[in-house]
Amino acid sequence: MFLKLQAFTRLSSFDREALAALGHLQTQEAQPRRDLIREGEQPKAVRLILSGWACRYKDLPDGRRQIVGFFVPGDFCDLNVYILKEMDHSLSAITRVLYAEIAPDEMERLIDERPRISQALLWHELVNASIQREWLLNVGQRSARERIAHLLTELFLRLRAVRLTEGNACDFPLTQADIAEATGLTSVHVNRTLQELRREGLIELTQRRLIIPDLDALMGVAMFNPNYLHLDHEGRHLDAND
Amino acid sequence: MFLKLQAFTRLSSFDREALAALGHLQTQEAQPRRDLIREGEQPKAVRLILSGWACRYKDLPDGRRQIVGFFVPGDFCDLNVYILKEMDHSLSAITRVLYAEIAPDEMERLIDERPRISQALLWHELVNASIQREWLLNVGQRSARERIAHLLTELFLRLRAVRLTEGNACDFPLTQADIAEATGLTSVHVNRTLQELRREGLIELTQRRLIIPDLDALMGVAMFNPNYLHLDHEGRHLDAND
DNA sequence: CGTCTGATTGAACTGATTCAACGGATGTGG
DNA sequence: CCACATCCGTTGAATCAGTTCAATCAGACG
């Protein structure tokens, strides 16, 4: 319970409200690098990430793998439970992850009783779709340097929106191989490109910790336009930092 | 009115039902290569493509452009009207496009009066998101040859689901430049790759007409797994052809 | 310590890009 | 009905961003 409350303070106002409306949560834990659910399976509950990072990924028969999205605390997964028959992608923990499982009937009750929450969930899905499109632009059109700068910027802004940054720094548990799989590059090239960004003073990234000395500069490199995150809806009051 | 009815017969059962439930449709027309709406604007109505092809795209300040999705007859766009403040991408016609505009209040009535339709719209959005993820896998991991084979296969299957194929053939109005922008390649390389696919007898593509002599073979090249299209929900009865 | 995971480096290689030119089909206006 | 323009597809040659393979290094941990 203490854990849960602690988590609340890290989530947006909407998330807190949604959680508060739930009587009893099934709090679950996943170990780093473990799959939560695999492509082809049928999801049985909506998940809400309380702490830690997770990702969606898809893979090809020959082993190539593409990370198609990251989840940070406050993010929902599998809102499709009712609608789609089976998962078209997999979910995997990056770090140790604590998450709440919300059973379908509980979810239904929530949606019925609180229309604002149903709207907010839809908003969440639409923003996810928007991020997805931006990633496609990222991988399809940007250079390695721009891609990586973009990814780092996005994650920093998303973390800031749920108050998981401290000034210009944040925890950053991704390995270079993770970044590679998310950007469609090889980890070797990610390594060299990160070094380049470091050399230019655009980022500091060591020991699972990211510092962005000049966010505007990094955004410039990435041609980052934050509109796709739709931060103006919920959580604008969380935009300011420290 | 005749036009509309003609369109009906080309849409899935759900779409027909949804349309039938609407009293009067605002049928609109867009000329080829014209934008329907641009990034940053506020959409004012839901659109349903009745005939022709359109696309979503995003662009960068320096002109690079990524097509992030195609719309074929029966597809909805801008279901986000109520929720998101402004467009994070643009819509553009590929061919001449006929579409219906459904005003927000009309939409609301539809959703209230017919819960099944509201579900179907949500299903439609989730499938779109799934396609988006597959495209990211496509651009991030597949080779040029695989990418193009994958795109052609997807479009053929989607057209077949709305009965817009004849046997192993369909209209295919995309230029090589369109294919390039959708796959993150240059049009020069698309050209060479299409020639390769043609040489191997995997496709015939001339005069805006696509023939796939051996669909399984092309799917093999693309490592195509149709699960992401979630064709098992609505429209399974449309799967069989001719 | 030994082991493991993740970061780093070097050198050779290649899939795809770039640039620039040309060809063919279609349409249009005089 | 010709002259011209435009759009799209095609080709060649040079180049390059990113890959591949393989080895080494550094920190974490039992």
Image: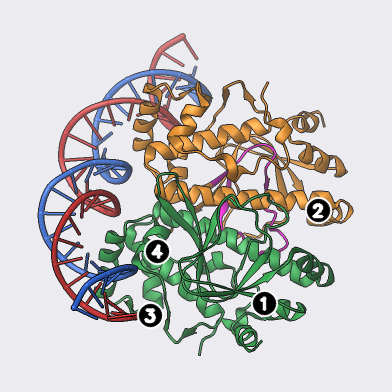
Chain colours: A green, B orange, C blue, D red
Q: Residues within 10 Å of mark 1 (few under 14, many from 20)?
A: many
Q: Is residue B166 magenta?
A: no
- Front one among A199 and B60: A199
**Is tag 4's residue or tag 1's residue first in the polypeptide sequence?**
1
**Residue type at mark 2?**
Met
The subunit carrying tag 1 is A
The subunit carrying tag 2 is B
**Residue type at mark 3?**
Arg
Stretch of the chain drawn in magenta: B69-92
Q: Are marks 1 and 2 on the same chain?
A: no
- Front one among A45 and A221: A45
The subunit carrying tag 3 is A
Q: Which mark is residue A204?
A: none
* Relative to A181, residue B168 above or below: above
Label 2 belongs to which residue? Answer: B107
Measure how far apart labels 1 and 2 are at the Cα level.
Answer: 28 Å
- Comparing marks 2 and 4, which lies closer to the viewer? 4
Q: Secondary structure at mark 1?
A: helix
Q: Secondary structure at mark 3?
A: strand
Location of residue D10 in the rendering, given as x and y in whole percent from the top left corner: 34, 25
Label 1 belongs to which residue? Answer: A15
